[in-house]
Image (spheres, rainbow, N blue to C red):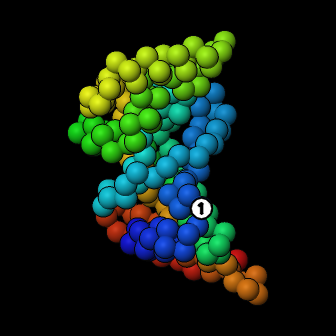
Amino acid sequence: MQTLERWLDEAADAGAPAPTAMTLATVGGNGQPSARVVSLKRLDPEGLVFTTALWTRKAAELRANPRVAVVFHWPPLGRQVRIEGRAEVAERELAEELFAERPRSHQLQALVSRQGEAIEDLGVLRTRLGELQSETAEDPIPCPADWGAVRVRPDVVELWSEGDDRLHERRLFERDGDKWTGTLLAP
């Protein structure tokens, strides 16, 4: 995890596009996999944290099966990190803290749009967004009760570094209780 933190910093320093973007793969109750890109909001000693509305498809899939996979990919650096673990809703205080850090436009969008639900027209949402902007002026936007932080607790971490000779370095780390074991894998 320390290497992941360093690689995230190096990706940002190198100007990699969206260095905190991570592909999150879940599995629904029907066994169908689903993947989408989310933003890493925090890397803490317990795992990787992202935020979402708790009524979304991804949140429902996490409740049905908390096993997830995450991938970071930084092509300019020739690096990739693959993580497998368990997702859980984090403490409410963290959700509120991270919601408060969001740009105001993102906070308002979270109140206006039920992400992933079928709609007839974006115009209705845009009208409601404009109304909310006027109604709330500069008032702080409270974190919605159905907004949460999700923490992915890693069990497996693979660090991949591109080799010019196609002999890529792959280091696999697996959790066994509180201990991690490392293995070098053939490319």
The quadrant holding residue 166 is: bottom right
* Residue 12 sits above or below residue 114 on the image: below
Which x, y percent locates residue 157? Answer: 50, 65
Q: Residue at x 51, y 27 (%)?
A: 56
Residue 36 point in image, percent of width and height:
61, 43
In this rendering, would 41 be left or right of 119?
Answer: left
Residue at 43%, 74% (x, y): give it: 6
The front one of 76 and 135 is: 135
Q: Secondary structure at mark 1?
A: loop
- Residue 172 can be seen in this image: no
Taking the view exactly as shown, the residue that stands out farthest to the left is 93
Q: Residues within 10 Å of mark 1 (few under 14, many from 20)?
A: few
User: Which quadrant: the N terminus?
Assistant: bottom left
Residue 45 lies, in percent from the top left, at 30, 61
Along the line of sight, the residue nearer the viewer: 91 or 135: 135
| Nearer-the-camera pick, 126 or 185 | 126
Q: Quadrant of the C terminus?
A: bottom right
Residue hosting label 1: 17
- Residue 181 in the figure: left or right of residue 135: right
Q: Residue furthest right?
A: 165
- Looking at the image, residue 112 lies above or below residue 64: above
